[in-house]
Image (cartoon, rainbow, N blue to C red):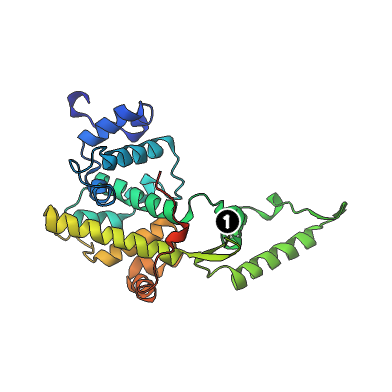
Amino acid sequence: MENNVIPLESELKEMDKMESFNIADKLGWFQYVSILTYKFYGLPGYDDDNQWHSVCLDFWGRYMRGDIKQEFTKEDYLNNIKIIKSIKSFGLDVDKFWLLLLFIYDYVFCHLSKGLFVDESSEVVFSKKLIAQLSKCKLEDVNISIKIGKKSVRISEVGKKAILRMLYRGYENTYSQALGYDIPFSGGLLQLSMSYHMKWAVELYEYTFNYLDKEWHLIHPHKLPNASLNRMLLFSRIMYLYGWTDNKSFLESDDSLRGILNAYKNKPIPRTCCQEYF
């Protein structure tokens, strides 16, 4: 880094993984993430292989290669004024928190969904993606074809409108309020509810915040104008950013998230479907 100029992430992505990792590490970007890698894989000096460091490096490599398939971008995060103001009001660093936010998303999603082609295996996910795609299209850009055996059924413009109307109504009645993935698992049906994702993610955020506050003494609240120092509301807004809910009440109140956490308080996370991270 010449003249202490912080490189853009687009520049880091052009570098060798280790080179870009070392730059990000020197900038301290992994400070908050390291709290969780220490928790999962041992403190440095206590494990011969320093696996906590390897996990951090592997996570960074996945991020630089674009292997983390989140539906939000860093720009979405930076443009979310309410989230950014809360982070700053706690006295935390925005860039370090971005990697923490992404790490928790990736860690939870990998453990609960890794190895499953969710959009191919889940009616809920397929229907939501289909409706999202259709909502961006004009009617004339949509083509529908149906085959019965070897015979094609002719679809007129009126027929196309009727089919789309049935799709929308079916979606509203059956899938629009669904919170989970209906995925076949071990011969049965496993509901990988997004509520489990939220429950686990909030646990990780709570652990990190408590560590930052009580162990490192890095939480120094200083409320910015129109900012919130309600941790749970911050977590609630992050769940919406993650795309784990489309309920806009998550943006204005923590009631919905607290309701989920209370309902799932005594329900263990279904770790039978967990995979090794990375």
Q: Which picture quadrant has residue 1?
A: top left
Q: Which picture quadrant has residue 48?
A: top left
**26 or 266, nearer to the observer:** 266
Residue 121 in view in this figure: yes
Amino acid bearing label 1: Lys
The quarter in which the C terminus is drawn is top left
Residue sitting at x 39%, y 40%: 63
Residue 92 spot, x, y in % from top left: 19, 51
- Mark 1 — residue? 129
Residue sitting at x 29%, y 33%: 21
Number of marks: 1
Q: Is residue 42 above or below residue 271?
A: above
Residue 258 spot, x, y in % from top left: 33, 73
Residue sitting at x 25%, y 31%: 23
Q: Secondary structure at mark 1?
A: helix
**178 or 197, nearer to the observer:** 197
Q: Which picture quadrant has residue 130?
A: bottom right
In this image, 209 relative to 238: left or right? Answer: left
**153 or 53, nearer to the observer:** 53
Q: Is residue 273 above or below residue 255?
A: above
In this image, 90 relative to 128: left or right? Answer: left
Residue 7 spot, x, y in % from top left: 28, 31
